[in-house]
Image (spheres, rainbow, N blue to C red):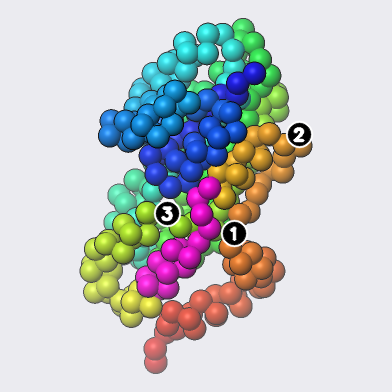
Amino acid sequence: MTSFALVTGASTGIGRATVKVLTINGWQVFAGVRKQADADSLRNEFAERVVPLLFDVTDAAAVRTAAQDIRVALNGRTPNALVNNAGIALGGPLAVIPPDDIRRVFEVNVMGAVNVSQATIPLLGADRTLTGAPGRIVNITSVAGKIAPPFLGDYAIAKHGLEAFSETLRRELMLYGIDVIAIGPGAVATPIWDKAEQTDASAAAATDYGPALKKFLPFFIAQGRRGLPPERIGEAVLLALTAPRPKVRYAIVPQEFLNWTLPRLLPKRVVDALIARQFGLKRSS
């Protein structure tokens, strides 16, 4: 029997790679995108294996319409999965970043996942009039959801929030047999790094943080471009959706000991000191 999933943020990067991995393994995917051009691109690549749905995750009404379209398409059965992948990052020092930027990142990364989850939880098994086993929800979080780097505070705040959302939702949805799994990638080689390189950081660069940013941005972009292929995250999503007893969280991180294990073992003050030394964040006398 065919398995069905809704994947948000499916136009590029991790979302599109997840669509690719799922369809190769026989899944039918409802792919959430914001632009018609992205919907057409998905159709051209994946043909009938993908049904593009046009909506912005921050538009609760549009999300509910998309959920209704899935309900109609599945004609009384539950889908197998929701993958909350849509997300953005803007970046900048928290002392100077416009609050509206932080709010925007939180709206997309956290409230977007809330909107889509609330609209699809009935389909995944809370509506007992539907047939089929309860589905699973996979939330794409980040290493930044556990280890917050400098100059990505907006993203880290949102991803920490998504981690908490995943934990609470998993415990609440036990009532319906709907499981919730978090996947926290490290650096992933996607087009986001080209966009990051073109970002205008002049406002922050003009502050006291300018010298540290000048060291941080090239380092961070280079690390990203050397990251894992996005299909590796898609494979982790497939595992989370098909394993008989999945973990509650998967950390998919390049150089795992250096970038994940060690920073979580060391005292936070030690990590602070290492970051300060690397990027020049020590107070000058």
Q: Position of residue 160 (x, y in %)?
A: 53, 51
What residue sits right under mark 1 in the picture?
253
- Residue 60 showing in the rendered view: no
- Magenta segment: does it hold 201? no
Taking the view exactly as shown, the residue that stands out farthest to the right is 245
Snapshot quadrant of residue 256: bottom right
Q: CA distance from mark 1 to mark 2?
A: 23 Å
What residue sits right under mark 3 in the picture?
190
Q: Magenta residues?
A: 216-231
Disc ID at residue 272 = none
Q: CA distance from mark 1 to mark 3?
A: 15 Å
Q: Position of residue 271 (x, y in %)?
A: 58, 74
Question: Which of disc 2 and disc 1 is earlier in sequence?
Answer: 2
Question: Which of disc 3 and disc 2 is earlier in sequence?
Answer: 3
- Magenta segment: does it hold 223? yes
Question: Which of disc 3 and disc 1 is earlier in sequence?
Answer: 3
Determine whether 90 is above or below 125 in the image. Answer: below
The kind of secondary structure the magenta stretch mainly shows is helix
- Residue 240 showing in the rendered view: yes
* Residue depicted at x 55% and y 79%: 274
